[in-house]
Image (cartoon, rainbow, N blue to C red):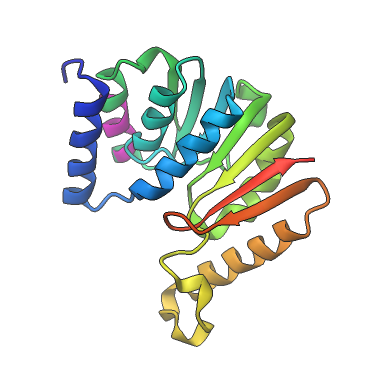
Amino acid sequence: MADQSAGALFTEMRSYAAQHHVPIMEEQGIGELVDLLKQQQPQKLLELGTAIGYSALRIAEALPAAHIDTIERDVDRYEKAMEYIDSSPMKSRVRAICADALEVDPAELDGPYDAIFIDAAKGQYDRFFEKYEPLLGDKGMIYCDNMSMHGMTEVPIQDVPRRKRTMIRNIRSFREKMAEHPRFQCELLAVGDGLLVCTKK
């Protein structure tokens, strides 16, 4: 894949994601996340859940000084992400790692990070947070996508498809825990599919 401009690359990635049913951030959500990151100006960012690399590259394009580590456990998606990263103008600042984020040794990562973006297995957010929060630097921020799960977290559990109930219960429990977290100030933003912004106190 030849090097492409960022705009052309993002258009191609959105098309690929739609055709192959790859979940990438909704445009409103990624737009808000990028705006928040521009305000924060992190130099080092960790993403859990690369998929095909769309959000990592959008963030890298918006933050020219930032370096991003991103972890993806699905080999096919990781390989596609590497194609897109390698053809992008941001390739020198994005490092993709093929692994299960719950099995990675944090000591092997380039922490501490100024920001952590969690967008991986939705029912495991509490475990991700507990594992990677120690890698967050002072005054760092953790961003969590899919806190609404297409509205399912806001309806009675009996109205949620049975196969998704455990995941929805886990997301609700995580949201409630973060609302009372002693070390973080958290705000749930009604953008995209629900974005939780947690600032280290």
Image-based side of 125 in relation to 32, left or right: right
- Could you say which quadrant of the image residue 77 lies in? top left
Q: Residue at x 58, y 19 (%)?
A: 43
Image-based side of 20 in relation to 180, left or right: left
Inspect the magenta stretch and tell me whether residue 63 lies in it: no
Q: Work out whether 23 lies above or below 149.
A: above
Number of residue marks: 0
The front one of 184 and 87 is 184
Q: Residue at x 23, y 37 (%)?
A: 13
The image shows residue 79 at horizontal and vertical percentages of 29, 31
Q: Residue furthest right?
A: 182
For the C terminus, give its image quadrant. top right
Q: Work out whether 126 lies above or below 69.
A: below
The image shows residue 182 at horizontal and vertical percentages of 83, 51
Res. 99 visible in picture: no
Magenta part of the chain: 77-83
Q: Residue at x 46, y 43 (%)?
A: 32
Q: Work out whether 195 lies above or below 59.
A: below
The front one of 62 and 182 is 62
The front one of 112 and 147 is 147
The front one of 199 and 129 is 199
